[in-house]
Image (cartoon, rainbow, N blue to C red):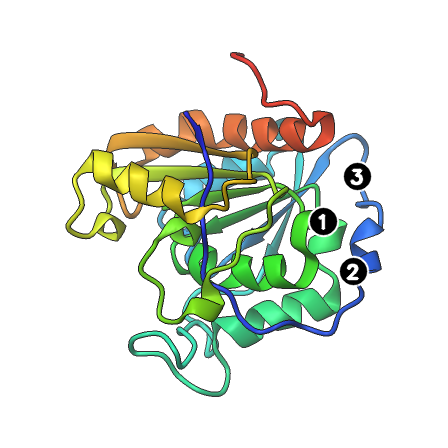
Amino acid sequence: GLSSASVPCPSPIPTPRSTMAAVAKHEGNRKVLTVIAPGAGMKTSEKVFDQLKRPDSGFEVRVEGQSKASYDVYPPTWQNGRVGSNLQTFGEEVVRKGFANRSDCLLFGSRGGQVVLPVLWRAFGNDVPPAVVINGGCAMSIMPTEDWQYWPAGTVTFLLMGGEDFFRGGHSPDQHILDAMSCAPLANGTTAILYVNQMKHMPQREILQPVLQLMLHAAMEWKSSGTAPGDK
C-alpha cells in the first residue's frame, strides 16, 4: 500500500538547490541509476546487481562509495558512531560533487538509507531524484536525535522492507509497517512500501531479483508523471 515516512537527517549543506535542475546524462535511452554502495549489499547480491548493469536492463549504473571504506561508519550522534569521516560526511561529499543531480533514480540499502539519503533530502528537498530504499532505513521512528527526522513532502520513495529484517526490532510485521508509515509527513503522498514477510536484512536473491527493477521503474514513473503507477 501507499504510505509515507520520516528519516534521520544531518545539518544543512550549503549547496545551491538549482544544481538539482541539471538534466541527467544518458547513454542512449538508458536511465542513470546511482547506487550508494555502503549498505547496498552489492557483494552479497552481486548477481542481482550484475543484471542491473546489463545493457538490456535500461539502466546506466553508477556506483558511489564503497562498503567497508574508512567512512562507512555511523556519525557520532548514532550508537557506536564516530567523529571524522563517516556516512554523513560521505553523503555531504556526494552532494558537493553533484552525483545525485546527474541521476534519474537512487538506490540505497541499510545504513545508506538511514544516513546518506537524509543528507541528500536535507540538501535538495523535493528535488532529490526518486529513491528505492532496501530495508526502509529512512523510515525508522527510533532515530538518535530529532535533527535527523526530516522527510520532504514531495519526494518519491519506494521502500522494500522485510519481516525477518533485524531493522524490525521488537515490532510485529504489522507494527513495523505502521511505524514506517508514521515517519513521513502527512503531506507526503508519494511514498510506497513493498513488505515481504520472509525477507531478511540481506535480501534473498529470489526475493530481490524479481522486484528490484520493477520498483526502480515504478519510482521513476511516479516522479515523471506525478501519478502513482498502476498495476503492471
The label on residue 127 is: 1
Q: How many marks?
A: 3
Q: Are marks 2 and 3 in contact (CB under 8 Å)?
A: no
- Is residue 60 or residue 114 the one in the foreground? 114
Circle nearer the N terminus (1, 3): 3
The residue that disc 2 covers is 17
In this rendering, the answer to whether 226 lies above or below 25 is above
- Is residue 208 or residue 137 the one in the foreground? 137
Position in image of residue 14 (x %, y %) = 73, 74
Q: Are marks 2 and 1 in contact (CB under 8 Å)?
A: yes
Circle nearer the N terminus (2, 3): 2
Is residue 43 among what the camera can see? no
Locate the C terminus by quadrant: top right
Residue drawn at x 53%, y 60% as measured from the top left: 118
Q: Amino acid at mark 3?
A: Glu
Q: Classify mark 2: residues with Cα within 10 Å, few (<14), some (14-19) or many (20+).
A: some
Position in image of residue 181 (x %, y %) = 39, 40
Is residue 162 among what the camera can see? yes
Residue most toward the front?
Answer: 186
Circle nearer the N terminus (2, 1): 2
The label on residue 209 is: none
Q: CA distance from mark 1 to mark 3?
A: 22 Å
Q: CA distance from mark 2 to mark 3?
A: 25 Å
Residue most toward the top?
Answer: 231
